[in-house]
Amino acid sequence: MTTSLVTGPTAGIGAAFARQLAAKGHALVLVSRDEERLGRTADELRERYGVAVEVLAADLATEPGIAAVEERLRDASRPVDLLVNNAGFGNRGTFLVAPMADELRMLRLHCEAVLRLTAAAAEGMRERGRGAVVNVASVAAFMPRGTYGASKAWVVRFTEGAAQELRGSGVRLLALCPGFVRTEFHARAGMNADALPSWAWLDADKVVAAALRDLARGRTVSVPDPRYKLAVALARHTPTRMFAAASTRTGRRYDPKNPPGPRTPR
Ligand SMILES: NC(=O)c1ccc[n+]([C@@H]2O[C@H](COP(=O)([O-])OP(=O)(O)OC[C@H]3O[C@@H](n4cnc5c(N)ncnc54)[C@H](OP(=O)(O)O)[C@@H]3O)[C@@H](O)[C@H]2O)c1
């Protein structure tokens, strides 16, 4: 039986991963902070797909949260075959507006947790000669967009480097780089999602299906949808300064009714 551990499975892209992996018959380990919501998500998945679902409530922006999930991933008696590092968030405001504590929380969740959980999972996978890790980055990785874009650029480069270093071991790594996806992300970050044109939005289920296809094909970076493949190609060939202005204008429109500043709890 295949077991997959998904972080951030209670909403958006992580929920789509959990559903699609359960539909393929994977047993699941679900990790996020809200214990009650995790329990509800697990019940729905068990009922609908008849798979075993374990829950682990942990805040992956904290040391105890990361350590608890590392311990679960290192438990050789219950091996995890696929790790999806998906949990993430956007800050409520640009540089010097978002509080430093929130910037550091982001680096811990997007970088430290991804590094440590990938290592904890990949050690056992390498011993068994098989396994995979999907790290959810963003097209923002290819554009200057504050700490968010920088943290996602780290996710892409880290994943590419680790994939190269583990080549031939049976462990595959993929960095998933979606464009705008309708999830809870923008409301949580106080962004005005209505300011974006409808054609810019992707569907979480399609994004996840594309990622799983790219993983099976042995790709290391997945940019679902031709619109965003083009955007990434443009970003790579446009002077950074020009692209930075456009990227920040489109990607970080905050909701005037919910002004930028410290994060509201959850
Ligand atoms: N939506 C987009 O347009 C978009 C585009 C590109 C990339 N992404 C990336 O896709 C990933 C998923 O985003 P989404 O849009 O699906 O967001 P979402 O709908 O807001 O879901 C976020 C999930 O992560 C969990 N989470 C948040 N902080 C956590 C923490 N500190 N510890 C553990 N779990 C945590 C949340 O549950 P709890 O609150 O209960 O912990 C929830 O399950 C993120 O890495 C994001 O950066 C999103």
Image (tube, rainbow, N blue to C red):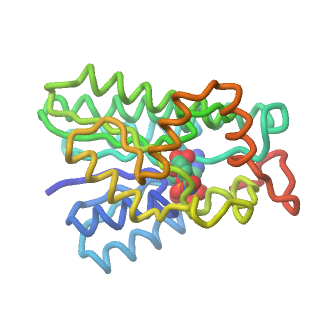
Q: Total of numbered circles in the picture?
A: 0
Query: Where residue 97 sits: x, y (%)?
Result: 84, 37
Asked whether, in this view, residue 63 is left or right of residue 41, the answer is: right
Residue at the far bottom in the pictured view: 47
Residue at the image point whose x is 80% and y is 36% from the top:
99
Report whether residue 34 is seen: no
Q: Quadrant of the N terminus?
A: bottom left
Residue at the image point whose x is 46% and y is 48% from the top:
86
Q: Quadrant of the C terminus?
A: bottom right
Query: Where residue 80 sits: x, y (%)?
Result: 25, 46
Asked whether, in this view, residue 167 is left or right of residue 202, the answer is: left
Quarter residue 28 falls in: bottom left
48 over 246 or under it: above or below:
below
Q: 171 or 233: which is nearer to us?
A: 233
174 over 33 or under it: above or below:
above
Residue at the image point whose x is 28% and y is 61% from the top:
21
Query: Where residue 171 sits: x, y (%)?
Result: 21, 33
Residue at the image point whose x is 71% and y is 44% from the top:
91
Quarter residue 142 falls in: top right
Report whether residue 161 is seen: yes
Query: Where residue 186 sits: x, y (%)?
Result: 67, 57
